[in-house]
Protein backbone atom coordinates (compact mmCIF):
# COMPACT_ATOMS: atom_id res chain seq x y z
CA UNK A 1 0.00 0.00 0.00
CA UNK A 2 1.28 3.47 -0.78
CA UNK A 3 0.43 6.78 0.77
CA UNK A 4 1.05 9.47 -1.83
CA UNK A 5 3.82 7.44 -3.44
CA UNK A 6 5.52 6.53 -0.13
CA UNK A 7 5.48 3.33 1.88
CA UNK A 8 2.32 3.36 3.94
CA UNK A 9 2.81 3.58 7.70
CA UNK A 10 0.53 1.57 9.93
CA UNK A 11 -0.93 4.84 10.97
CA UNK A 12 -1.40 4.41 14.70
CA UNK A 13 -0.30 0.84 15.20
CA UNK A 14 3.30 1.57 14.14
CA UNK A 15 3.93 5.09 12.91
CA UNK A 16 2.40 6.61 16.03
CA UNK A 17 2.50 3.98 18.76
CA UNK A 18 6.12 3.23 17.96
CA UNK A 19 7.07 6.84 17.35
CA UNK A 20 9.83 8.68 19.14
CA UNK A 21 8.19 8.86 22.57
CA UNK A 22 6.93 5.28 22.56
CA UNK A 23 10.20 3.99 21.15
CA UNK A 24 12.14 5.52 24.01
CA UNK A 25 9.64 4.03 26.47
CA UNK A 26 10.19 0.58 25.01
CA UNK A 27 13.97 0.95 25.06
CA UNK A 28 13.92 1.96 28.71
CA UNK A 29 11.25 -0.60 29.53
CA UNK A 30 7.78 0.65 30.49
CA UNK A 31 6.83 0.88 34.12
CA UNK A 32 4.63 -1.82 35.59
CA UNK A 33 1.56 0.40 35.45
CA UNK A 34 2.30 1.75 31.96
CA UNK A 35 0.05 0.69 29.11
CA UNK A 36 1.30 1.38 25.58
CA UNK A 37 -0.89 1.34 22.50
CA UNK A 38 1.14 -1.52 21.04
CA UNK A 39 0.51 -3.56 24.19
CA UNK A 40 -3.20 -2.71 24.16
CA UNK A 41 -3.48 -3.94 20.56
CA UNK A 42 -1.55 -7.10 21.40
CA UNK A 43 -3.89 -7.93 24.28
CA UNK A 44 -6.96 -7.16 22.15
CA UNK A 45 -5.94 -9.56 19.39
CA UNK A 46 -5.37 -12.30 21.97
CA UNK A 47 -8.34 -11.81 24.31
CA UNK A 48 -11.15 -9.90 22.61
CA UNK A 49 -14.30 -12.12 22.58
CA UNK A 50 -15.57 -10.79 19.24
CA UNK A 51 -12.39 -12.07 17.58
CA UNK A 52 -12.78 -15.44 19.29
CA UNK A 53 -16.35 -15.70 17.98
CA UNK A 54 -15.18 -14.91 14.45
CA UNK A 55 -12.48 -17.59 14.71
CA UNK A 56 -15.05 -20.13 15.92
CA UNK A 57 -17.27 -19.27 12.94
CA UNK A 58 -14.27 -19.76 10.64
CA UNK A 59 -13.61 -23.20 12.13
CA UNK A 60 -17.26 -24.17 11.52
CA UNK A 61 -17.07 -22.91 7.92
CA UNK A 62 -13.91 -24.95 7.36
CA UNK A 63 -15.72 -28.03 8.65
CA UNK A 64 -18.60 -27.36 6.23
CA UNK A 65 -16.12 -27.15 3.36
CA UNK A 66 -14.53 -30.46 4.39
CA UNK A 67 -17.98 -32.06 4.56
CA UNK A 68 -18.76 -30.78 1.05
CA UNK A 69 -15.57 -32.39 -0.23
CA UNK A 70 -16.42 -35.59 1.63
CA UNK A 71 -19.75 -35.86 -0.21
CA UNK A 72 -17.79 -37.01 -3.29
CA UNK A 73 -16.50 -40.03 -1.36
CA UNK A 74 -18.46 -43.27 -0.94
CA UNK A 75 -20.20 -44.19 2.28
CA UNK A 76 -18.72 -47.36 3.82
CA UNK A 77 -20.25 -49.13 6.79
CA UNK A 78 -18.97 -52.28 8.48
CA UNK A 79 -21.09 -54.36 10.85
CA UNK A 80 -20.45 -57.48 12.90
CA UNK A 81 -22.58 -59.34 15.39
CA UNK A 82 -22.43 -62.42 17.57
CA UNK A 83 -25.56 -63.76 19.21
CA UNK A 84 -26.30 -66.61 21.58
CA UNK A 85 -29.65 -67.47 23.13
CA UNK A 86 -30.69 -70.37 25.37
CA UNK A 87 -34.26 -71.55 25.80
CA UNK A 88 -36.32 -74.05 27.71
CA UNK A 89 -39.68 -75.09 26.24
CA UNK A 90 -41.96 -76.71 28.82
CA UNK A 91 -45.19 -76.63 26.79
CA UNK A 92 -46.39 -77.50 23.35
CA UNK A 93 -49.66 -77.22 21.42
CA UNK A 94 -51.45 -80.53 20.84
CA UNK A 95 -53.25 -81.37 17.57
CA UNK A 96 -56.49 -80.55 19.35
CA UNK A 97 -55.23 -76.96 19.80
CA UNK A 98 -54.60 -77.26 23.53
CA UNK A 99 -51.46 -76.37 25.44
CA UNK A 100 -49.75 -79.42 26.93
CA UNK A 101 -46.71 -79.90 29.19
CA UNK A 102 -43.61 -81.52 27.79
CA UNK A 103 -42.00 -84.23 29.86
CA UNK A 104 -39.15 -83.69 29.93
CA UNK A 105 -38.94 -80.01 28.80
CA UNK A 106 -37.07 -79.21 25.60
CA UNK A 107 -33.76 -77.39 26.23
CA UNK A 108 -31.78 -75.75 23.42
CA UNK A 109 -29.15 -73.18 22.48
CA UNK A 110 -29.12 -70.99 19.35
CA UNK A 111 -25.91 -69.28 18.20
CA UNK A 112 -25.17 -67.19 15.13
CA UNK A 113 -22.51 -64.86 13.72
CA UNK A 114 -22.82 -62.24 11.00
CA UNK A 115 -20.45 -59.80 9.30
CA UNK A 116 -21.27 -57.30 6.55
CA UNK A 117 -19.62 -54.53 4.58
CA UNK A 118 -21.89 -51.98 2.93
CA UNK A 119 -20.75 -49.41 0.37
CA UNK A 120 -22.89 -46.72 -1.24
CA UNK A 121 -21.64 -44.19 -3.75
CA UNK A 122 -23.75 -41.38 -5.13
CA UNK A 123 -22.59 -41.05 -8.72
CA UNK A 124 -24.85 -38.14 -9.61
CA UNK A 125 -26.81 -35.65 -7.56
CA UNK A 126 -27.68 -33.34 -10.36
CA UNK A 127 -24.39 -31.46 -10.00
CA UNK A 128 -25.31 -30.32 -6.48
CA UNK A 129 -22.10 -31.53 -4.88
CA UNK A 130 -19.95 -29.44 -7.21
CA UNK A 131 -21.86 -26.25 -6.53
CA UNK A 132 -21.98 -27.02 -2.79
CA UNK A 133 -18.21 -27.39 -2.82
CA UNK A 134 -17.88 -23.97 -4.44
CA UNK A 135 -20.38 -22.42 -2.03
CA UNK A 136 -18.67 -23.79 1.08
CA UNK A 137 -15.25 -22.73 -0.23
CA UNK A 138 -16.54 -19.18 -0.69
CA UNK A 139 -18.20 -19.26 2.74
CA UNK A 140 -14.96 -20.48 4.30
CA UNK A 141 -13.07 -17.67 2.60
CA UNK A 142 -15.65 -15.16 3.84
CA UNK A 143 -15.34 -16.49 7.40
CA UNK A 144 -11.56 -16.10 7.28
CA UNK A 145 -11.91 -12.55 6.01
CA UNK A 146 -14.37 -11.80 8.81
CA UNK A 147 -11.75 -12.86 11.34
CA UNK A 148 -9.46 -10.23 9.83
CA UNK A 149 -12.33 -7.75 9.79
CA UNK A 150 -13.17 -8.50 13.43
CA UNK A 151 -9.54 -7.88 14.31
CA UNK A 152 -9.62 -4.63 12.34
CA UNK A 153 -12.74 -3.40 14.10
CA UNK A 154 -11.52 -4.47 17.54
CA UNK A 155 -8.17 -2.77 17.01
CA UNK A 156 -9.87 0.41 15.80
CA UNK A 157 -12.13 0.45 18.86
CA UNK A 158 -9.15 0.00 21.17
CA UNK A 159 -7.20 2.72 19.38
CA UNK A 160 -10.08 5.12 19.82
CA UNK A 161 -10.47 4.11 23.48
CA UNK A 162 -6.75 4.51 24.05
CA UNK A 163 -6.75 7.96 22.45
CA UNK A 164 -9.82 8.94 24.49
CA UNK A 165 -8.10 7.75 27.66
CA UNK A 166 -4.88 9.53 26.79
CA UNK A 167 -6.83 12.74 26.13
CA UNK A 168 -8.45 12.48 29.55
CA UNK A 169 -5.03 11.82 31.07
CA UNK A 170 -3.75 15.01 29.42
CA UNK A 171 -6.74 16.91 30.79
CA UNK A 172 -5.90 15.60 34.28
CA UNK A 173 -2.31 16.80 33.84
CA UNK A 174 -3.46 20.17 32.53
CA UNK A 175 -6.03 20.59 35.31
CA UNK A 176 -3.38 19.68 37.89
CA UNK A 177 -1.09 22.33 36.47
CA UNK A 178 -3.98 24.80 36.42
CA UNK A 179 -4.73 24.08 40.09
CA UNK A 180 -1.11 24.70 41.04
CA UNK A 181 -1.17 27.97 39.09
CA UNK A 182 -4.43 29.02 40.80
CA UNK A 183 -2.88 28.26 44.18
CA UNK A 184 0.12 30.42 43.35
CA UNK A 185 -2.21 33.21 42.23
CA UNK A 186 -4.09 32.87 45.52
CA UNK A 187 -0.84 33.21 47.48
CA UNK A 188 0.06 36.34 45.53
CA UNK A 189 -3.43 37.71 46.10
CA UNK A 190 -3.08 37.13 49.85
CA UNK A 191 0.21 38.96 50.01
CA UNK A 192 -1.18 41.87 48.01
CA UNK A 193 -4.30 41.91 50.17
CA UNK A 194 -2.14 42.14 53.27
CA UNK A 195 -0.54 45.32 51.94
CA UNK A 196 -3.94 46.62 50.77
CA UNK A 197 -2.96 46.42 47.11
CA UNK A 198 -6.24 44.63 46.30
CA UNK A 199 -9.61 44.50 48.03
CA UNK A 200 -11.20 41.48 49.73
CA UNK A 201 -13.37 40.79 46.67
CA UNK A 202 -10.27 39.94 44.61
CA UNK A 203 -9.02 37.67 47.38
CA UNK A 204 -12.35 35.87 47.53
CA UNK A 205 -12.27 35.56 43.74
CA UNK A 206 -8.84 33.89 43.93
CA UNK A 207 -10.15 31.45 46.54
CA UNK A 208 -13.16 30.64 44.34
CA UNK A 209 -10.86 29.97 41.37
CA UNK A 210 -8.86 27.49 43.46
CA UNK A 211 -12.02 25.63 44.50
CA UNK A 212 -13.26 25.55 40.90
CA UNK A 213 -9.90 24.19 39.78
CA UNK A 214 -10.14 21.47 42.43
CA UNK A 215 -13.63 20.49 41.22
CA UNK A 216 -12.49 20.49 37.61
CA UNK A 217 -9.54 18.24 38.47
CA UNK A 218 -11.79 15.82 40.38
CA UNK A 219 -14.19 15.61 37.41
CA UNK A 220 -11.29 15.01 35.02
CA UNK A 221 -9.99 12.16 37.16
CA UNK A 222 -13.44 10.55 37.25
CA UNK A 223 -13.73 10.73 33.46
CA UNK A 224 -10.22 9.30 33.09
CA UNK A 225 -11.14 6.29 35.23
CA UNK A 226 -14.30 5.73 33.17
CA UNK A 227 -12.53 5.72 29.81
CA UNK A 228 -9.75 3.47 31.16
CA UNK A 229 -12.40 0.96 32.22
CA UNK A 230 -13.98 1.11 28.77
CA UNK A 231 -10.55 0.55 27.23
CA UNK A 232 -10.01 -2.51 29.40
CA UNK A 233 -13.38 -4.02 28.46
CA UNK A 234 -12.82 -3.44 24.74
CA UNK A 235 -9.42 -5.12 25.13
CA UNK A 236 -11.29 -8.18 26.40
CA UNK A 237 -10.42 -7.75 30.06
CA UNK A 238 -12.51 -6.97 33.16
CA UNK A 239 -13.24 -3.30 33.66
CA UNK A 240 -12.23 -3.26 37.32
CA UNK A 241 -8.69 -1.96 36.88
CA UNK A 242 -9.48 1.47 35.53
CA UNK A 243 -7.45 4.42 36.71
CA UNK A 244 -4.20 2.65 37.58
CA UNK A 245 -2.59 2.71 34.13
CA UNK A 246 -0.38 5.46 32.79
CA UNK A 247 -0.74 5.81 29.03
CA UNK A 248 2.13 6.69 26.73
CA UNK A 249 1.96 9.41 24.11
CA UNK A 250 1.62 7.79 20.69
CA UNK A 251 4.03 10.20 19.04
CA UNK A 252 3.84 12.67 16.18
CA UNK A 253 1.22 12.61 13.46
CA UNK A 254 2.15 11.47 9.95
CA UNK A 255 2.29 14.10 7.21
CA UNK A 256 -1.10 14.46 5.53
CA UNK A 257 -0.10 16.76 2.66
CA UNK A 258 1.04 13.99 0.31
CA UNK A 259 -1.99 11.72 0.72
CA UNK A 260 -3.52 10.67 -2.60
CA UNK A 261 -7.27 10.12 -2.26
CA UNK A 262 -7.60 8.17 -5.51
CA UNK A 263 -4.78 5.77 -4.60
CA UNK A 264 -6.17 5.27 -1.12
CA UNK A 265 -9.66 4.55 -2.45
CA UNK A 266 -8.26 1.91 -4.79
CA UNK A 267 -6.22 0.43 -1.95
CA UNK A 268 -9.21 0.33 0.39
CA UNK A 269 -11.50 -1.27 -2.18
CA UNK A 270 -8.86 -3.89 -2.95
CA UNK A 271 -7.75 -4.82 0.56
CA UNK A 272 -10.58 -4.06 2.97
CA UNK A 273 -11.42 -7.44 4.59
CA UNK A 274 -15.04 -6.55 5.29
CA UNK A 275 -15.63 -5.69 1.65
CA UNK A 276 -13.80 -8.83 0.49
CA UNK A 277 -15.98 -10.89 2.84
CA UNK A 278 -19.11 -9.46 1.22
CA UNK A 279 -17.69 -10.34 -2.17
CA UNK A 280 -17.16 -13.92 -0.97
CA UNK A 281 -20.73 -13.91 0.37
CA UNK A 282 -21.98 -12.98 -3.09
CA UNK A 283 -19.97 -15.82 -4.64
CA UNK A 284 -21.33 -18.29 -2.09
CA UNK A 285 -24.88 -17.09 -2.70
CA UNK A 286 -24.40 -17.54 -6.44
CA UNK A 287 -23.22 -21.11 -5.89
CA UNK A 288 -26.20 -21.84 -3.65
CA UNK A 289 -28.49 -20.64 -6.40
CA UNK A 290 -27.03 -23.25 -8.76
CA UNK A 291 -27.37 -25.80 -5.96
CA UNK A 292 -31.07 -25.00 -5.70
CA UNK A 293 -31.48 -25.28 -9.48
CA UNK A 294 -29.67 -28.65 -9.54
CA UNK A 295 -32.59 -30.14 -7.61
CA UNK A 296 -34.41 -30.35 -10.96
CA UNK A 297 -31.88 -32.95 -12.21
CA UNK A 298 -31.99 -36.72 -11.53
CA UNK A 299 -29.85 -38.59 -8.99
CA UNK A 300 -27.95 -41.84 -9.47
CA UNK A 301 -26.31 -44.04 -6.83
CA UNK A 302 -24.72 -47.47 -6.64
CA UNK A 303 -24.68 -49.79 -3.63
CA UNK A 304 -22.71 -52.94 -2.79
CA UNK A 305 -23.37 -55.20 0.18
CA UNK A 306 -21.02 -58.07 1.12
CA UNK A 307 -21.99 -60.33 3.99
CA UNK A 308 -20.92 -63.50 5.77
CA UNK A 309 -22.93 -65.43 8.33
CA UNK A 310 -23.36 -68.81 9.97
CA UNK A 311 -25.85 -70.48 12.28
CA UNK A 312 -23.92 -72.36 14.96
CA UNK A 313 -24.81 -75.42 16.93
CA UNK A 314 -24.91 -75.41 20.72
CA UNK A 315 -21.51 -77.10 20.90
CA UNK A 316 -19.77 -74.85 18.35
CA UNK A 317 -17.29 -72.22 19.51
CA UNK A 318 -19.13 -68.96 20.15
CA UNK A 319 -16.43 -66.56 18.93
CA UNK A 320 -16.33 -67.68 15.31
CA UNK A 321 -14.85 -64.86 13.24
CA UNK A 322 -14.80 -66.69 9.91
CA UNK A 323 -18.40 -67.65 9.08
CA UNK A 324 -18.84 -69.98 6.10
CA UNK A 325 -22.05 -68.65 4.52
CA UNK A 326 -21.40 -65.85 2.00
CA UNK A 327 -23.61 -63.45 0.07
CA UNK A 328 -23.44 -60.20 -1.86
CA UNK A 329 -25.84 -57.73 -3.40
CA UNK A 330 -25.36 -54.98 -5.98
CA UNK A 331 -27.88 -52.19 -6.51
CA UNK A 332 -28.12 -49.25 -8.88
CA UNK A 333 -30.72 -46.62 -7.99
CA UNK A 334 -31.91 -43.75 -10.16
CA UNK A 335 -34.55 -41.21 -9.17
CA UNK A 336 -35.99 -38.08 -10.65
CA UNK A 337 -38.42 -35.94 -8.74
CA UNK A 338 -40.95 -34.78 -11.31
CA UNK A 339 -43.33 -32.78 -9.15
CA UNK A 340 -42.94 -31.40 -5.62
CA UNK A 341 -45.54 -28.66 -5.35
CA UNK A 342 -43.13 -25.92 -6.53
CA UNK A 343 -40.82 -26.44 -3.51
CA UNK A 344 -37.77 -26.36 -5.78
CA UNK A 345 -39.01 -23.19 -7.43
CA UNK A 346 -39.34 -21.58 -3.99
CA UNK A 347 -35.81 -22.66 -2.99
CA UNK A 348 -34.36 -21.28 -6.23
CA UNK A 349 -36.20 -17.98 -5.79
CA UNK A 350 -34.91 -17.59 -2.23
CA UNK A 351 -31.37 -18.40 -3.35
CA UNK A 352 -31.64 -15.81 -6.14
CA UNK A 353 -32.83 -13.23 -3.61
CA UNK A 354 -29.87 -14.01 -1.34
CA UNK A 355 -27.47 -13.64 -4.28
CA UNK A 356 -28.94 -10.29 -5.32
CA UNK A 357 -28.95 -9.03 -1.73
CA UNK A 358 -25.29 -10.04 -1.27
CA UNK A 359 -24.36 -8.20 -4.46
CA UNK A 360 -26.28 -5.12 -3.30
CA UNK A 361 -24.58 -5.24 0.12
CA UNK A 362 -21.18 -5.38 -1.59
CA UNK A 363 -22.01 -2.43 -3.82
CA UNK A 364 -23.33 -0.39 -0.89
CA UNK A 365 -20.26 -1.12 1.22
CA UNK A 366 -17.99 -0.16 -1.68
CA UNK A 367 -19.71 3.21 -2.00
CA UNK A 368 -19.51 3.82 1.76
CA UNK A 369 -15.80 2.92 1.92
CA UNK A 370 -14.99 5.25 -0.96
CA UNK A 371 -16.97 8.04 0.70
CA UNK A 372 -15.32 7.48 4.08
CA UNK A 373 -11.80 7.36 2.66
CA UNK A 374 -12.27 10.64 0.78
CA UNK A 375 -13.84 12.30 3.82
CA UNK A 376 -11.07 11.09 6.15
CA UNK A 377 -8.30 12.24 3.82
CA UNK A 378 -9.89 15.67 3.72
CA UNK A 379 -10.33 15.60 7.50
CA UNK A 380 -6.73 14.69 8.37
CA UNK A 381 -5.46 17.37 6.00
CA UNK A 382 -7.84 19.94 7.47
CA UNK A 383 -6.98 19.00 11.04
CA UNK A 384 -3.27 19.20 10.31
CA UNK A 385 -3.69 22.89 9.44
CA UNK A 386 -6.07 23.50 12.32
CA UNK A 387 -3.62 21.91 14.75
CA UNK A 388 -0.85 24.21 13.56
CA UNK A 389 -3.04 27.26 14.14
CA UNK A 390 -4.31 25.98 17.51
CA UNK A 391 -0.74 25.51 18.71
CA UNK A 392 0.17 29.03 17.66
CA UNK A 393 -2.82 30.40 19.55
CA UNK A 394 -1.90 28.37 22.65
CA UNK A 395 1.72 29.53 22.52
CA UNK A 396 0.73 33.18 22.14
CA UNK A 397 -1.85 32.84 24.92
CA UNK A 398 0.74 31.30 27.24
CA UNK A 399 3.14 34.15 26.59
CA UNK A 400 0.36 36.65 27.21
CA UNK A 401 -0.52 35.00 30.55
CA UNK A 402 3.09 35.15 31.67
CA UNK A 403 3.17 38.87 30.94
CA UNK A 404 -0.21 39.36 32.66
CA UNK A 405 0.91 37.63 35.85
CA UNK A 406 3.91 39.90 36.02
CA UNK A 407 1.62 42.91 35.51
CA UNK A 408 -0.67 41.62 38.26
CA UNK A 409 2.29 41.32 40.66
CA UNK A 410 3.25 44.91 39.90
CA UNK A 411 -0.35 46.00 40.34
CA UNK A 412 -0.83 47.25 36.78
CA UNK A 413 -3.44 44.62 35.86
CA UNK A 414 -6.69 43.84 37.67
CA UNK A 415 -7.41 40.39 39.01
CA UNK A 416 -10.48 40.01 36.79
CA UNK A 417 -8.48 40.77 33.64
CA UNK A 418 -5.82 38.26 34.71
CA UNK A 419 -8.41 35.53 35.20
CA UNK A 420 -9.91 36.20 31.77
CA UNK A 421 -6.48 35.79 30.16
CA UNK A 422 -5.79 32.63 32.15
CA UNK A 423 -9.14 31.16 31.05
CA UNK A 424 -8.33 31.97 27.43
CA UNK A 425 -4.92 30.29 27.72
CA UNK A 426 -6.40 27.24 29.42
CA UNK A 427 -9.06 26.90 26.73
CA UNK A 428 -6.39 27.24 24.03
CA UNK A 429 -4.31 24.42 25.56
CA UNK A 430 -7.39 22.21 25.83
CA UNK A 431 -8.27 23.00 22.21
CA UNK A 432 -4.80 21.83 21.13
CA UNK A 433 -5.19 18.56 23.06
CA UNK A 434 -8.68 18.01 21.62
CA UNK A 435 -7.61 18.84 18.06
CA UNK A 436 -4.62 16.49 18.31
CA UNK A 437 -6.92 13.75 19.64
CA UNK A 438 -9.44 14.25 16.83
CA UNK A 439 -6.67 14.16 14.23
CA UNK A 440 -5.31 10.91 15.65
CA UNK A 441 -8.76 9.34 15.65
CA UNK A 442 -9.23 10.34 12.00
CA UNK A 443 -5.86 8.77 11.15
CA UNK A 444 -6.87 5.59 13.00
CA UNK A 445 -10.11 5.34 11.02
CA UNK A 446 -8.27 5.94 7.75
CA UNK A 447 -5.73 3.27 8.63
CA UNK A 448 -8.52 0.81 9.46
CA UNK A 449 -10.10 1.37 6.05
CA UNK A 450 -6.93 1.32 3.99
CA UNK A 451 -4.31 -0.53 5.96
CA UNK A 452 -6.41 -3.00 7.91
CA UNK A 453 -5.81 -1.22 11.20
CA UNK A 454 -3.12 -3.58 12.39
Image (cartoon, rainbow, N blue to C red):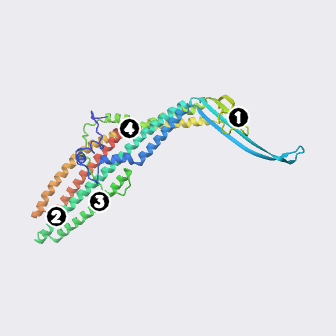
Question: Looking at the rendered structure, which numbered label has been put on residue 272?
Answer: 4
Q: Residues within 10 Å of mark 2 (few under 14, many from 20)?
A: many
Question: Looking at the rendered structure, which numbered label has been put on residue 185?
Answer: 2
Q: Do the numbered discs 2 and 3 sit on residues whose CB atoms are within 8 Å?
A: no
- Residue farthest toward the front in the current orientation of the protein: 315
Give how far apart the Cα atoms at labels 3 and 1 are: 86 Å
Q: Residues within 10 Å of mark 4 (few under 14, many from 20)?
A: many
Q: Nearer the viewer, mark 1 or mark 4?
A: 1
Q: Do the numbered discs 3 and 1 sit on residues whose CB atoms are within 8 Å?
A: no
Q: Nearer the viewer, residue 147 or 328?
A: 328
**Residue 127 picture location, percent across and down:** 56, 29
**Residue 28 picture location, percent across and down:** 23, 48
Q: Where is mark 3, residue-wise? A: 221
Give how far apart the Cα atoms at labels 2 and 3 are: 23 Å
Residue at screen point 23% across, 55% down? 427
> Quadrant where the C terminus lies?
top left
Query: Which one is earlier in the sequence, the residue at label 3 or at label 4?
Result: 3
Question: Looking at the rendered structure, which numbered label has been put on residue 310?
Answer: 1
Q: Which element is circle 2 on? A: helix
Amino acid sequence: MSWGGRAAPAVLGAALALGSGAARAQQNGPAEDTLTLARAIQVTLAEQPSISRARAAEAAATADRLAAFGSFLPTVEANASLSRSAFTSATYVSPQGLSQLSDPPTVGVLQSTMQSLYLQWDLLRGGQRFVDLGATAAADRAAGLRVTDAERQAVLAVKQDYLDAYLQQRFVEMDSAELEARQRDLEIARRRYEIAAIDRGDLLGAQIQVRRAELKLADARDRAREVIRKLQVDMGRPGDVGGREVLRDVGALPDADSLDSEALVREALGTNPGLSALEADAAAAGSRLWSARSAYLPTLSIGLNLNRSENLGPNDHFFTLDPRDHGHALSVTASWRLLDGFARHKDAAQAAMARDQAAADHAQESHEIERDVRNLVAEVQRRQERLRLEREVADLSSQRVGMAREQFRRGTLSYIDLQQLIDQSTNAEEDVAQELHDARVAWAKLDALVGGGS
